Structure formats: C-alpha cells, structure tokens
Image (cartoon, helix red, strand yellow):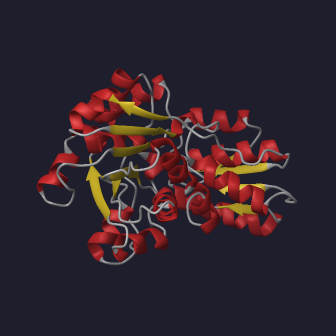
Amino acid sequence: MTEHFHLNTPLLESVSMSKCAGTTVYLKMENSQPSGSFKIRGIGHMCQQLATQSKGVVCSSGGNAGMAAAYAARHMGVPATIVVPSSSPQVVIQRLQDQGAAVKVIGKVWDDANAEALRLAESEGLTYVPPFDHPLLWQGHASIMSEVAASLGPGVKPGAVVLSVGGGGLLCGVVQGLKDVGWAEVPVIAMETVGADCLNAAVKAGRVVTLDDITSEAKCLGAKTVCRQAFEYSQSGETPVLSELVTDEQALHAVETFLNEERVLVEMACGATLAAVYTGLVHRLQQEGRLPTPLRPLLLIVCGGSSIDVEQLNNLRNKLRS
C-alpha cells in the first residue's frame, strides 16, 4: 500500500486574485486530489488507521467525504457503503458508483444520512467513517499546512488562511497544521454561505447550536451542527478564527469568476472561500482592523468538490437567478 492516498497538491500564485486582494494570493489546489477534494487527506489517513481489516466502511456524505471513502476503500480492497441525502446531485451518485461503492439515498439533509450510516455501522459491523468530526481526520488534513510551509520556504508566512466550513473538519485540520509549523498566530477566515452557517450561528450564540434546516445551495457545506472542536478553536483565540458569511449568489459568482480567470471549475462550497477575495470581504476585514494592513500573502484553500459539472453549474444559475 502507498504511504498515503493524497497528493502533495500545487501551490499556485493567482495574479488576478492578487490584484483584487491587494496582496499576493496563493491557491492550494486541493481540487486536484484524486477524489476531487481535500477530504482524501483525513479520510485516507483514518481508513489506513482503522479499516485495514474491516468488513467494509460506511460514510455519510453529501459527496466529497463519500468520494474520498470510496476511493480509499477501493484501493484498500474493502467494500464501501456511502449514504447520501436526496439533495445530492445525480453526478455525485454516479461517481461514487464508478468508484465501486454501494450508494444509499436517505433523508433530505446530511444529518438524516448520517443517522442511517451509524445504524449500518452498528447492525452490519462496518467501520464508520465520519465526514468531519474525528481527530484522525484533522490529523490528515493538517498535512496541507506542512506542504504550504515547505512550498513557501523559510521566512514566508501567510497573512491569513481562507477556507470553507461545513462541519468544521478542514478548519480543525488547518488550525492543527498551523500549530505544527509554528504559525499558530496566523488568522483563519472561516467562510460559510447564508443558510449553511452552523459555525457562524454558534459563534453568535456563544455555544454549539443546530440549524433548523439547510437552505443554501452549497449542499456540501450542509451540516446543521458544527463539530465541537471547530467551535472551541473559534473561541480560544490562540489562532484567530474570523467567521464570515457570503450569499449563495456571491458564492456562485465566485465559482464563475474563478472558472473564467483560473480555468478551474469548483463547487459552491469552494466558491464561499473564493468569494472572500472577489467580494472585497478581505478589504473590509482590514478596514475593521481585524486583519493587518499591509497584509502578508493570503492563502486560499481551494477545497474543490466532486458535485459540480457544467450541467450542475447551469442548474445553480437557473435556481439562483430565475
């Protein structure tokens, strides 16, 4: 077996985004992972730790975690069952089946699918692979930051890291990774869309809360409750976590702009990250004194996504602009 399933992804400078942000913007291209997103880092690591002798793995996912679990299971030679909510696009289900996974469609949102995955793990003796809430996942995702540090070289430190939050697994991994490389004080801008904003709701309430529903079209951000570790990082202050929101329309516009400027198609969940630059949100944070001026290089984690193609992009345009 290979040492790990993920790739050391490119770190690219974006000239157009740098111009927009007023500082150098680096893109960590997690969309180029074999499963289509950063999820393979944590899920691949967890599967190697827990599932080598397993009867099979079961994962609940709106798409990306399931793709990572299916990819890892196929390469380990163990069966995979992926439970997806009905909101998952057909393209995701087809790609999961192409990876050799059995797919079950249960419920409306991820939380419904997750309840079924837990039931299957118990009743059939499968290894449960959570999409975001486990220390092994965060340990795997932390490798992003060690790669970035190696790519930037000594003496170059980001001014801030921008990433998207669904359940909070990437946030936990990046904060852990920042500590690992000695950058604990670097702020993290945690982006969500309105209607899939479980971290922002928790930050405002001062406690972990559960959203009534997911109303955003960024379905891969659609966890109703953020993981406790992510919330605790947002409160601790050791690594500043700035929780920010954009609308679905802003996220979609960012996806389209990124496709035009960088020739890369990513899903709405990733569009939330990109929108931090395209909407001028980074400038606003500087004006408010929450980010320094001038700002050292900005690092955007292009988390990617397996639930997007041209047809799905057109569907989103029709839904949000009709």
Residue 130: image location, x then y, percent: 63, 61
| Towards the viewer: 13 or 151 | 151
Q: Residue furthest left?
A: 287
Residue 10: image location, x then y, percent: 52, 35
Q: Quadrant of the C terminus?
A: top left
How many dots with numbers? 0
Q: Is residue 266 left or right of residue 121?
A: left
Residue under the point 56% across and 65% down: 133
| Quadrant assignment, res 175 | bottom left
Residue under the point 32% across and 44% down: 297
Q: Residue furthest front?
A: 155
Using the image, determine if residue 309 lies above or below residue 27: above
Q: Is residue 54 left or right of residue 119?
A: right
Residue 195: image location, x then y, percent: 33, 54
Residue 273: image location, x then y, percent: 36, 45
Q: Is residue 79 left or right of residue 248?
A: right
| Towards the viewer: 123 or 45 | 45
| Towards the viewer: 37 or 105 | 37
Residue under the point 46% across and 29% down: 312
Residue 102 appears anywhere in the view: no
Residue 50 appears anywhere in the view: yes
